[in-house]
Image (spheres, rainbow, N blue to C red):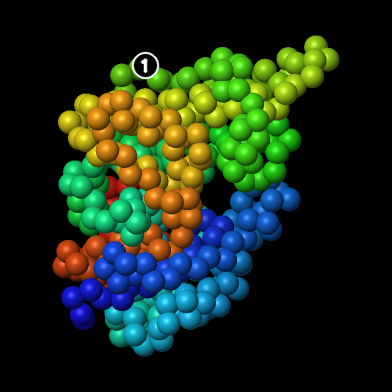
């Protein structure tokens, strides 16, 4: 292999087939085939539909990535794939494809953790990660605070959601407000026309002394508030509800993240995952980090949502660190813990 090998990453943990190609920390291609429209009519992701969509999209998405990068498949030096966590069937499609490509090309295979990949992807935009840093991952399935001494070797869990993840709460509240799936982008858009202080929604676990999150109570509070207005025959200004809900979520997220930085004496905070694309979260995090003297890193929105580039980025780190490649019999682990960076 060259000093900076070409790594192809495959991501199929949920409803997006992502393929990325990197050389070191240089992004060469990032292609995505999303099945979100197929799930929208159900109001959420249907695992079987997602798995079938991955099967159909895998080869064309890899071909598009190679074309985008101006490469041939034979140029690839290593394959990285999300081995977990995620939907079992969806993961199996990606892992099986990665094994086939690695075997056919005679290159090493790296099964990686989806969550650690969300941390690693920031390096494609902002360079090598500070060691250590605090990472907050917020998505449809996860809300986690992590201490990251070295993303290729060690990730320590500091806290996580005890019920709904932040992204899950966005989806459920969007449904209550009559907004389409997925809820995050639509609430973000509608909230710009409302006031975040219009309604005093609760902040779960904000002062409990832990680094855990809880958004189930907030989701229920929004639903009960809407029901009360409907029973009273009162009109509802949806932008105010959306903005007030969004403010409650990002208030808790940023407070907990800075609490973690202070508690562990770390001056660098990274935010990743699909909810990191939320404009209010990005703005409030920057405001509070500036006030606290903490350096903030957030990838551009296109690298926050699930993508193959993040898998390739972590795979590149593993190659550079000399980590032993995965065996060709690695399983897909839908409940892989964040502390397992590589299998």
**Image x and y of residue 47, in percent:** 59, 56
| Secondary structure state at the residue bearing disc 1 | loop
Q: Quadrant of the N terminus?
A: bottom left
| Residue 172 visible at all | no
Question: Would residue 291 be seen by someone viewing this image from the given angle?
Answer: yes
- As drawn, is 15 to the left or to the right of 299? right
Instruction: Give the tally of numbered discs.
Output: 1
Residue depicted at x 52% and y 77%: 64
How far from the left and from the top, in percent, is residue 280? 50, 34
Q: Please say if 71 is above or below 341.
A: below
Q: Nearer the viewer, residue 221 or 249?
A: 249
Reply above or below: 306 against 321.
Answer: above
The answer to which image quadrant residue 266 occupies is top left
Residue with the most extreme top position: 232
Answer with the quarter of the image where residue 143 lies: top left
Vertically, is 108 above or below 116?
below
| The quarter of the displayed image where residue 331 is located | bottom left
Q: Residue at x 41, y 86 (%)?
A: 72
Whole-percent x, y for residue 19 in the image? 46, 69
Q: Which residue in the protein does label 1 denote?
A: 207
**98 to the left or right of 225:** left
Q: Which is more toward the observer, 42 or 242?
A: 242
Instruction: Report x, y in % for residue 237.
Output: 72, 23
């Amino acid at each position: 292999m060259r000093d900076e090998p070409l790594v192809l990453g495959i991501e199929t943990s949920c409803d997006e087939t992502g393929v990325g190609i990197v050389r070191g920390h240089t992004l060469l291609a990032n292609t995505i085939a999303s099945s979100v429209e197929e799930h929208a009519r159900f109001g959420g992701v249907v695992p079987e539909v997602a798995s079938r969509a991955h099967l159909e999209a895998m080869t064309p998405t890899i071909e598009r990535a190679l074309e985008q990068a101006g490469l041939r498949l034979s140029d690839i030096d290593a394959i990285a794939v999300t081995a977990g966590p995620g939907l079992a069937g969806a993961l199996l499609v990606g892992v099986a494809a990665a094994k086939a490509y690695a075997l056919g090309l005679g290159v090493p295979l790296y099964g990686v953790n989806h969550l650690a990949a969300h941390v690693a992807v920031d390096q494609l935009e902002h360079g090598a990660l500070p060691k250590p840093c605090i990472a907050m991952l917020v998505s449809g399935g996860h809300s986690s605070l992590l201490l990251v001494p070295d993303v290729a070797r060690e990730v320590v869990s500091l806290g996580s959601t005890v019920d709904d993840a932040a992204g899950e709460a966005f989806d459920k509240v969007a449904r209550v407000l009559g907004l389409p799936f997925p809820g995050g982008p639509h609430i973000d858009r509608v909230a710009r026309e409302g006031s975040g202080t219009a309604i005093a929604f609760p902040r779960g676990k904000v002062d409990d002394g832990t680094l855990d999150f809880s958004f189930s109570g907030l989701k229920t509070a929004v639903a009960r508030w809407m029901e009360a207005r409907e029973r009273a025959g009162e009109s509802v200004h949806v932008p105010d509800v959306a903005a007030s809900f969004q403010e409650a979520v990002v208030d808790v997220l940023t407070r907990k993240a800075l609490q973690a930085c202070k508690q562990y004496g770390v001056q660098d905070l990274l935010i990743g995952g699909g909810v990191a694309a939320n404009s209010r979260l990005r703005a409030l995090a920057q405001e509070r980090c500036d006030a606290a003297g903490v350096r903030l890193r957030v990838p551009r929105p296109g690298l926050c949502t699930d993508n193959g580039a993040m898998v390739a980025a972590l795979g590149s780190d593993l190659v550079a660190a000399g980590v032993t490649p995965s065996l060709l019999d690695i399983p897909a682990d839908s409940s892989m813990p964040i502390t397992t960076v590589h299998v």
